[in-house]
Image: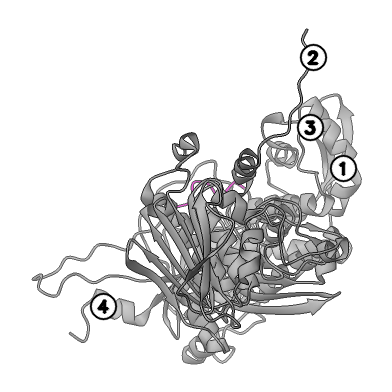
Amino acid sequence: MPAVTIQVLPDQLINQIAAGEVVERPSAVVKELVENSLDAGGRHIEIEVEQGGLGLIRIRDDGGGIPREQLATALQRHATSKIASLEDLESVASLGFRGEALPSILSVSRFALTSRTAQDAHGWRIGGAGAVDASEPQAAAHAVGTTVEVRDLFFNTPARRKFMRAESTEFRHIDQLARRLALARFDLRLALRHNGRRALDLSPATDDAAREARIAEVCSEEFMANAVMLDESRLGFRLWGWVALPSFARAQPDLQFLYVNGRMVRDKLLGHALRRAYADVLHSTRYPAFVLFLELDPAGVDVNVHPAKTEVRFRQSAQVHDFLFGCVHQLLRRIRPDPLQHHRVELHAPAEAAPDPVQEPLRYARPASYGGSASQFGGSNFSEIREPAPTLASTAWPLYAGANSPAADGNGAMAVAQQPLGRALAQLHGVFILAENRTGLVLVDAHAAHERVLYERYKHQLESGGIPAQALLVPEVVRVGEAEADQLETQREALSRLGLVIDRAGPEAVTVRALPPLLAKTDLGALLRSLCGEDGDSESHFGEVLDAQHRILADMACRSAIKANRRLTLPEMDALLRDMETTELSGQCNHGRPTWVQVGAEDLDRLFLRGR
């Protein structure tokens, strides 16, 4: 076998290899260059691109500029003005610092760097195609600041260029990046043009109103209408920004903006904390929306983890995780029903020119299944959902008094004025509660709402020492798989705190000796199997003890809640509405589905062409 030959690679090839890490696509070039502009003190930055950035990327700033004698040095690898020692690296506060971006971009493009400092009478230019043309900069007309031009990206690496997407796709990445930068620096004037057309033009936002206006322009007016302000500080951490209500959940994570000390990041630790904070209120297929800024001592975070600096590592990762989770989770739990900011449904009237319009009936979505056990309101088990005739319960308003009475004096107008969810009027299809409040019509999914009320009640009972159990007169033996029986036996003590007292009855069986009263008529086999995972999966729900207990409580609440076709009396409906108004996270059920929607009076007027 021949001996191995080791050789030193040429500088240009080294730079092109580095470009593979730093310059993934045109948006990565924009990111590196704009971060350099910000680190140079730029407050007015213009981004101009053509052909999605593959034809041209031009970044102009009004920063401090680069002296003539340092322009050539700026294009060398590992040349930077931002760190000079290990101490600087461990507490870096600038956005860029590796000193790889400019030479890497130069190695795969036709590149020009023009800059002027306040001490110079004119600017100086240096550049090249794949490598520097000349070591000496040339004089050029330029204002104080820097302009970088990148043309024909990947012109000398055609294999890389083939992996680029369509022009519209590449520009969309640049547009998203510009918007993220706009939220990172409210003091920045930022403009973006594509093929000569202005896509973004933002003035500095110097006060709260201007900042909210910028967020509305970047994230949409709808986001701001559904967002809640957050600002919490403790343990040396500060978290501030805007968190959208769970009702504003998205089909994709397109409105998630997270910054650490002003740096855009996509961090698994922080992402996990935010998912946990929303776990009880979002469906598994939906994503929360937020604009959040985490601030901490720069020495407590390592930003030298990824070449593009989009990932970070925290020295106190557990504390950071718990702080972020706690802030957002507690904020969500403080939200109570607000008819003006929750699940508003707009009904569209027919065109005015249409004679004798025929109105469509209100549509509703019937849940696939509500389970099958009796609730605290009574009722029978249902093995399947039937399609009942669309009849309404009596609309008479009863005069009664009690703990959950909406108005003890029977004054319906007082109830509408004082209660966010108003007073119950009727029940529709055995599924929905219709109520009237000061804003208009409220529609409530009775099962989903009751499920949330029970779930929160169970959690409070668990925190206060455990859920009371009722011993069975005759213990019931339940057949399960051997793996499931092993899991249940292992978690016997934890289950007892949840009101489920079990013993092992054999290799594939357990004996249920006691359970919460609300589960008296539940299918115990289905319940126990659901606690261990689906289809006998060896991966149990008991991964994290508290989360596992909450998942069990959520399943218990789902099985105990009001079932479809259970006819409720008006006092029962009003009692549920009052419970919703005082229950945390009552806007969504445990699976993330909305529990109620608001139809405004003005929408009803439009539907019936009133006032026209």
Q: CA distance from mark 1 to mark 2?
A: 61 Å
Depth check: give the residue in front, 350 or 290: 290
Magenta segment, principal secondary structure? loop
State left or right for residue 36 relative to residue 445.
right
Residue at left offset 62%, top offset 38% = 13
Q: Tell me residue 416's x, y (percent).
A: 49, 86
- Per the image, label 3 sits on a secondary structure element best described as helix
Q: Amino acid at mark 4?
A: Arg
Residue 164 vertical position relative to residue 277 in the rendered view, above or below: above
Q: Quadrant of residue 186?
A: bottom right
Q: Which badge, 2 or 3, comes first in the chain's sequence?
A: 2
Amino acid found under the numbered disc labelled 1: Gln
- Nearest-to-viewer mark from 2 and 3: 2
Which residue is identified by label 4? 606
Q: CA distance from mark 1 to mark 3?
A: 11 Å
Which amino acid type is marked by label 3?
Glu
**Dot 1: what SS?**
loop
**Mark closer to the chain start, 1 or 2:** 2
Structure colour scheme: one colour
The mark nearer the N terminus, 4 or 2, is 2
Closer to the chain start, of discs 3 and 4, is 3
Label 4 to label 1: alpha-carbon separation: 57 Å
Outermost top residue? 1
Please name the residue shown 19% across and 69% down the image.
Answer: 350
Q: Residues within 10 Å of mark 3 (few under 14, many from 20)?
A: many
Q: Which residue is mark 3?
A: 484
Instruction: Identify the residue under disc 2.
Output: 3
Which quarter of the figure is the N terminus placed in? Answer: top right
Span highlighted in magenta in the image: 365-372
Residue 451: horizontal and vertical position, in percent? 63, 59
Q: CA distance from mark 2 to mark 3?
A: 58 Å
Circles 3 and 4, Cβ within 8 Å, touching? The answer is: no
